[in-house]
Amino acid sequence: MDWLSIKIWLWGMISSEGAPAWVQAIGSIAALIVAIYVSKSSIKHASVLRQKTMFSVAEASHRYACSIRAAIDYINDEPGSNLQLYGVYHKDVMAGMVTALQALPVHEFATSRQVISILGLTNQLVFLGVATEKLLLDPSLIPELSKSWEEVVGDRKGRRELRSTIIQVLKRNALTHLDKFDEHYNVLKQSMPR
């Protein structure tokens, strides 16, 4: 390759009468390519940012659910062991979390797995609220169980065993909803863009 001939050819192109038009055409094409790239990049960035913002609602709900789990884990057969749950759970806070999840524009999530996860989180919070409300009551005050209590009226040992069984069933029910909530949350978290 002869550099002198390349230099002469290049100088001929630059000094010709059509050179300004060629330079302008090439510059316009380059500007168009850059504009398209920047536009696509900013749209993608905005979408990722929006999904992360929506995920923060799920993350807040998960933190709240974790605090409820810690309080439920503390509950045992002893009367008053549910006191810690009173300090964590409130039905209005739970309703607010559910409303926030329901308000998310699920059509803006990128995958069907993310949509299913958000819907699952919402449902599990509703179910968890119902289960937690029952754990706040003494088992003898739960209306659906009044017949069982009547059957063991004078039997202290029977009442203790019934109480223990009811608490364990109610606790397991709440923990099952928390486990399902965690599953949906983990699927959502893993599918979010980094």
Image: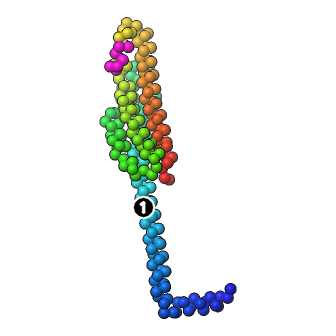
Q: Residue furthest right?
A: 1
Total numbered labels: 1
Taken as a whole, is the magenta stretch helix, strand or loop? Answer: helix
Who's the residue at 47% across and 68% down the image?
37
Q: Position of residue 10 (x, y in %)?
A: 57, 88
For mark 1, give the secondary structure.
Answer: helix
Quadrant of the rendering where the N terminus is positioned? bottom right
Q: Nearer the viewer, residue 40 or 161?
A: 40
Q: Is residue 153 above or below residue 79?
A: above
Is residue 146 on the magenta stretch? Answer: yes
Q: What span is in magenta?
A: 142-148
Instruction: Give above or below for 133 relative to 139.
Output: below
User: Would residue 29 be visible to someone looking at this image?
Assistant: yes
Q: Residue furthest left?
A: 92
Q: Residue at x 43, y 63 (%)?
A: 42
Q: Amino acid at mark 1?
A: Ile
Most distant residue in the top direction: 154
Q: Is residue 80 magenta?
A: no
Compared across the picture, whether 6 is left or right of 121 comes to: right
Q: Is any atom of residue 63 visible in this view?
A: no
Residue 183, horizontal then vertical, whole percent: 49, 38
Assess disc 1: are there few (<14), some (14-19) or many (≥20) residues with their C-alpha within 10 Å of its C-alpha: few
- Left or right: 25, with 94 as reference point: right
Q: Residue at x 49, y 42 (%)?
A: 186
What colouring method underlies this structural image? rainbow
Name the residue located 43 percent from the left edge and 29 percent from the top edge. Answer: 174
In the foreground, 17 or 76: 17
> Which residue does the numbered mark 1 point to in the structure image?
43
Q: Position of residue 4 (x, y in %)?
A: 64, 91
